[in-house]
Image (cartoon, helix red, strand yellow):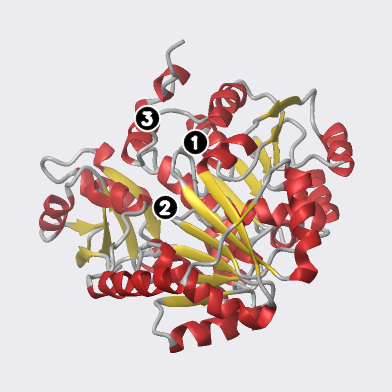
């Protein structure tokens, strides 16, 4: 049987073109099973592990079904963490970019006033954490009457974080005539009860990707007393020489302590944990995605929702206390068809946790042999030789996608009574530019941003030098990154 292609789902050309630009060649198992059902508006319960491609499994068909002219949100995605909300927002934005789908993420610890401004514009998809979504519902700043799709992602994590009451409150506020999609690595009884109450004859989909995780990720552990962990970490780094690595610690303090030790050794590393400001966390993740440093030292907030290409090694400096977090951590490497290595440090007292992980996931994690002095010395030379070359910048989704798309800045916004159709009309009047060449138009108070597609930015910028918008003289230039 020939492998399915995204064209087999009868998707529109704009979505297919986006998928091609993003490097989506053929559907993963979860995408094959889920996309046709969502296109038919079926309620589904999907049991799927991390790294299976599940975000695209619901984002692709929802983007296909979005009515672009509708001003109010048509899809709502609930996630347990801010990082995951942002990651899903980014995936929707890229998949729907050529269709001009606008997506926004809302979560706590970000000024609600900024989010209210975003929600006043035309927004097709909203992703967010249950508490902040509920806050917007109670303030009447999130319009729900046009919601056709509800996605509950990482439902088991919502349950473990105590969010289910908030999730139920959100569901109770939504239109009854909608499609509900639930994704979870495990399906405990409490989640099944939720499904029975709020879903209409849901279809159960199970994607067996644990075995593929076993195939893609080389897993090993080292038994080590706590005071000797850093010494072992150095040996592992010299002999494995990761291109890009996430190192997980149990607490914020452990992260900060390890970063200090690693920076003293001149390792290229940064911290990520819940004690940091949200903007700082976002900047660190984006910088890591671009390959600007090698080691991201983090707590479990980074175990879900961070999709970084070509992470070669995951190191559990501290073994996770919760079994599920082991799979979520190591799932940051070996994504889709890539291979990866997962290394776990285990103190004698923690050996029981390792055994519980093996039993729960039906896996055998082999014990690694500590590198010899000779292996370390040889590896050290090679490691420092590698450091002399310029860091290899990663080409993430945005880099690939943005080759033909340029964001331009226009010095006029809402205060000059400028609307998206005014901007689109002026740009479309430039010879050689069609309405299809204009992407998302984002009107701010005093200025606007416009995506120009298909490499026509220079033509548009030159044409705007001789144009006015609604009779007002404007300045246009490439937007600063």
Q: Quadrant of the C terminus?
A: bottom left
What's the distance in space between the residues labelled 2 and 3, CA to CA?
21 Å
Q: Which residue is label 3 attached to?
A: 16
Residue 438 % position (x, y):
28, 45
Front disc: 1 or 2: 2
Q: Nearer the viewer, mark 1 or mark 3?
A: 3
**Nearest the eye: 235 or 209:** 235
Q: Position of residue 266 (x, y in %)?
A: 39, 84
In the rendering, at what x and y percent does residue 88 appear? Answer: 54, 50
- In the picture, measured across the screen, residue 36 lies left or right of residue 418, that is right
> Crowding at label 1, few (<14), some or many (≥20) Cα neighbours within 10 Å?
many
Point 22% across, 70% down: residue: 389
Residue 63's tag is: 1
Q: Position of residue 276 (x, y in %)?
A: 58, 79
Give the class, few, some or many, for how many residues have Cα within 10 Å of label 3's Cα (few <14, many ≥20). Answer: many
SS of the residue under disc 3: helix
Image: 145 above or below 241: above
In the foreground, 311 or 370: 370
Badge 2 element: loop
Depicted 265 relative to depicted 222: above or below: below
Q: Residue at x 39, y 38 (%)?
A: 99
Residue at the top extreme of this rendering: 1
Residue annotated with mark 2? 309
Instruction: Say which residue appears at 45% left-offset and 19% top-offset.
Output: 4
In the image: residue 323, left or right of residue 193: left
Query: Marks 1 and 3, Cα distance to the nearest angstrom?
Result: 11 Å
Q: Earlier in the sequence, mark 2 or mark 3?
A: 3
């Amino acid at each position: 049987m020939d492998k399915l292609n995204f064209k087999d789902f009868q998707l529109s050309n704009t979505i297919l073109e986006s998928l091609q630009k993003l490097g989506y060649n053929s559907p993963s198992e979860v995408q094959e099973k889920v996309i046709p059902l969502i296109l038919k508006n079926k309620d589904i319960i999907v049991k799927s592990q991390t790294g299976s491609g599940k975000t695209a499994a619901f984002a692709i068909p929802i983007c296909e079904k979005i009515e672009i002219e509708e001003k109010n949100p048509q899809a709502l995605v609930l996630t347990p963490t801010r990082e995951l909300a942002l990651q899903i927002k980014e995936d929707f934005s890229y998949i729907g970019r050529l269709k001009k789908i606008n997506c926004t993420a809302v979560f706590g610890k970000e000024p609600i006033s900024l989010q209210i401004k975003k929600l006043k514009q035309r927004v097709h998809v909203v992703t967010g954490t249950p508490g902040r979504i509920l806050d917007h519902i109670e303030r009447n700043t999130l319009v729900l009457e046009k919601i056709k799709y509800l996605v509950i992602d990482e439902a088991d994590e919502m349950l473990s974080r105590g969010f289910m009451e908030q999730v139920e409150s959100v569901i109770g506020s939504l239109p009854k005539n909608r499609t509900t999609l639930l994704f979870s690595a495990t399906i405990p009884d409490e989640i099944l009860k939720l499904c029975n109450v709020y879903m209409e004859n849901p279809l159960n989909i199970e994607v067996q990707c644990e075995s593929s995780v076993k195939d893609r990720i080389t897993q090993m552990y080292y038994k080590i007393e706590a005071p000797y962990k850093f010494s072992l970490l150095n040996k592992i780094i010299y002999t494995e020489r990761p291109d890009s690595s996430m190192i997980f610690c149990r607490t914020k303090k452990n992260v900060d302590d390890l970063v200090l030790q690693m920076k003293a050794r001149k390792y290229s590393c940064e911290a990520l944990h819940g004690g940091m400001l949200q903007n700082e966390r976002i900047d660190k993740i984006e910088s890591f995605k671009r390959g600007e440093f090698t080691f991201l030292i983090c707590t479990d907030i980074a175990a879900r929702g961070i999709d970084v290409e070509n992470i070669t090694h995951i190191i559990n400096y501290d073994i996770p206390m919760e079994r599920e977090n082991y799979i979520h951590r190591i799932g940051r490497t070996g994504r889709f068809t890539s291979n990866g290595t997962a290394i776990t440090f285990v103190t004698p007292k923690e050996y029981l946790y390792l055994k519980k992980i093996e039993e729960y996931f039906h896996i055998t994690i082999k014990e690694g042999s500590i590198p010899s002095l000779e292996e370390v010395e040889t590896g050290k030379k090679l490691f420092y030789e590698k450091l002399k070359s310029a860091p290899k910048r990663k080409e993430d989704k945005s880099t690939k996608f943005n080759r033909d798309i340029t964001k331009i800045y226009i010095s006029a916004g809402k205060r000059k009574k400028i609307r998206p159709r005014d901007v689109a009309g002026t740009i479309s009047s430039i010879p050689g530019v069609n309405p299809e060449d204009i992407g998302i138009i984002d009107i701010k108070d005093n200025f606007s941003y416009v995506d120009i597609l298909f490499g026509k930015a220079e033509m548009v910028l030159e044409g705007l030098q001789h144009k006015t918008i609604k009779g007002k003289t404007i300045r246009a230039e490439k937007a600063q990154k």
